[in-house]
Each structure stands twice: as structure tokens, then as C-alpha cells.
Image (cartoon, helix red, strand yellow):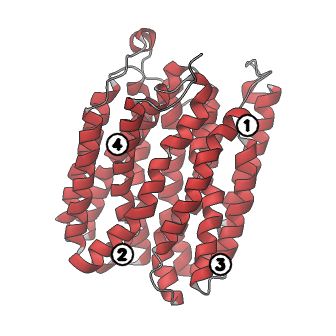
Amino acid sequence: MKKETIWNRDFILLLSTNAFVFISMHMLSTTIAKYATTLQGTAAVAGLIAGAFSITSIVVRPICGNLIDRRKKKTLYLASIFVIFLSMLGYSVSTTNVMLLVFRLLHGVGWGFATTIGMTMATNTAPEGKIGEASSVYGLANVLAMAVAPSLGSYLSENYGYRVMFLAAAVVVACALLCLWLVKDQPVDKGAAKNRGFSLSSLILKEALTPALVILLTGMAYSSVTTFLIIYASGVGIESPSVFFSVYAVAILVVRLNAGRIVDKKGPEWIMVPAGVFFCACLIVLANLQNAPMLYLAAVLMGFGYSANMSTMMAVAFKRTSKAQRGVASSTINIGMDVGTGMGSAVAGVIAGLVGYSRLYLVLIVPVVVATVLFVLDQSSFRKGRGLYAAKTNKGATV
């Protein structure tokens, strides 16, 4: 009997596509806020611009989730990445924060479609019993991006200027377009294409609402950490603070190579509950940051505390619905991510301006704790077939 595996030509190409898309995004994650401040923006303005692309992502994701279950996915995916390419070119010519904001919003349109479609296409290439593993491994593209992109973005902007950095990001996006061009398109479920119109149930999947809220809360904390980390660590006197992201990437690699299999075999609680503890520990270390070793410790703790959250919640949502609804499931989870990262950057900028960065990280413990408790309660309801899941047959469920 042939052993089931997630590794096939299309999955590898989609993984590569995702890696290039995330590299381009993370090249900007620690530089876009700094660039906004060079254009005479305050900390609050910088935070708003950093998370602004989440605004348009939130708007387009429900539409995208419906469309990709009814239309050819590859065409939509190519178009979305091309929009990201255009936004990178736009950043390179932006000379005011208003222009920067406009192209950041355009970036959000492409980002909203691309990240929703990519995950759906990737998991569709995997065997049903390997959904958790496929989701987790697919997220490894973010590991590569986190390992090289922030440092690359900082190096290019500091040594060659922001314009060169933005144009380099555009070249990276062009590589994503090339990889995706080689992927085979996926068939559309005829029933979904014919019968599903636009309605609330076709735009938002109720079974994925709580997982999406978990991602919203933890994503809020995560984006708050990454958006202002370089500024905060530099203020403490730490040299080369972008190394944090490389250390974080190593921790992610360890987690992601194992998390998917654990979710498939034992259940998501084996990932999410320990993650909540590690994330809180990370925030406590950052609140008391004094030197580089503490910064690297925080990176390891955040790797174990956040890196598998998105892929785990995505696997949970996919396993709770049919293959024909994975587009809506993906968009629902990603809406949570967008709201969280958008709110995180903007709200954190305001809080940091009021109480400082160290106390900001203590405040961020609250959403992490709430997210962990919500997950535990939701998972218990699902396994027992209560509340939202009362109409489901959940005995023997593996998620």
C-alpha cells in the first residue's frame, strides 16, 4: 500500500509561492513603520500604516472565500499576487504618508485574496488524513520569510535606501508569480459553483468563528510585538535587534515540523494550551527587556507560543467542514488574523505612546489569556456536541 504524503509537485510550488509572498511582506514588517516616521509620522500614524493593509484584507476576504469555492482558484491567485506586485512599486514612489497609506490599502486587497486562496489550494492537494500536517508545513513558508526577510529589509533600507528595498520586494513578488504560473488549476465543485450565492452563511463559516477569534486575539499581541520591536530594542541599547526574527524562525521550524502531526493524531489542544503559556512568558520577558540574551529568549518563547496558532486553527476549521467550503473557512480564519494584526499595530501604537513599550507588553498578556480560555471552551463544546455544534455528530472527532 502506497504511503500517503503531502509532498507533490503542486504542493511544493504552492509552498514556494507562499514563501515569496511572505518574504515580501516581512521585508516591510519592521521597515514600513520606520519609513512612515521618516515622513514625519508619529508612533500612532506609523502603527496605523503598518496595519492598514489589514483593513482592505478584512473587506475582501469574505468575498474571496465565496469566490474561490465557485471559481477557478489559480486565476484569482495570480491576479491577487499581481496586485501585491503593484503595491510594492507604489511604495517605492511614495513620498508622503498619505501615498504610503493608499498603497498599503491596495496591498491589503492582494494580500486578502492571496493568503486565503493559497492555503485552500495547498490543503486541497493533501490527503484528508494529512490536513493538519499540510496546513502546518505550508506555514513553513513563513519560517523562511521570518528568517531572512526582516534582516534583508533592514539591511537594504539602511544601506541602499527605502526605494531600493521596496523594489527588491517587488522582484520577490515576481518570483511568486512565476512559481504559481506552473501550478495546475484545481477543479470547482459543480454544486458549489451553481448553487451558492452571496449570503451571510456563504461569506462567514460559523464553525470557524471561535477559531477566528482566537487568531484575532493572539494575532493582535503578535503584531504589537513585531511592529515596534526594532524601535523598542534599539532604545534599550541592543545592537542588531533584527536577529530576534532569525532566532524566532528557528523556533518556528521546530514547532511546525511537529505541530501538524500532533494535531492530526492527538488534537489541537495539545498545541494551543501550551502555546498560551509560552506566549505569556515571552511577553513578560519583553516587558523586562535589558539585553540581547533576553531578546533571544523572548524569540524562542514566541516561536513556541504563536507560530503554530494559525495553521492549527486553520486545520480545525477545515476538519469541521466539507472540502467545498474550505474557501469560506479559510477566509473566516484569515479575517480574524487581519482584524487582529490591524488592531494590534494601531492600538499598540496608542498604548505605547501612553504607557511606554515595556508596559505595553504586560497589557498584551490579557488577549493571549482570553484566547486560550476561549479555545478550551470551544474545543470542549465541539467534542461534546453542545451549543454551536449541537447538530453535529462529533463522537470520534479528531479535532
Q: Residue at x 59, y 60 (%)?
A: 251
**Do tag 3 and tag 1 residues touch (Cβ < 8 Å)?**
no
Q: Choose the circle earlier in sequence order: 2 or 4.
A: 4
- Give the x, y percent position of residue 183: 31, 30
Q: Which mark is residue 267?
A: 1
Q: Nearer the viewer, residue 278 or 365?
A: 278
Does label 3 or label 4 sit earlier along the sequence? 4
Say which residue label 2 marks. 34
Give the secondary structure at mark 4: helix
Please say if the residues under marks 3 and 2 sit with CB atoms less than 8 Å apart.
Answer: no
Badge 2 amino acid: Lys
Q: CA distance from mark 1 to mark 2?
A: 41 Å
Q: What distance separates the C-alpha of mark 2 from that of mark 4?
A: 27 Å
- Find disc 4 in the rendering and name its residue: 17
Q: CA distance from mark 3 to mark 4?
A: 36 Å
CA gap, disc 3 to disc 1?
Answer: 32 Å
Name the residue type under label 3.
Ala
- Look at mark 3 in the image and give the residue it sits on: 287
- Does 47 sit above or below residue 67? below
Tell me where residue 30 appears, x and y as whole percent.
Answer: 40, 69
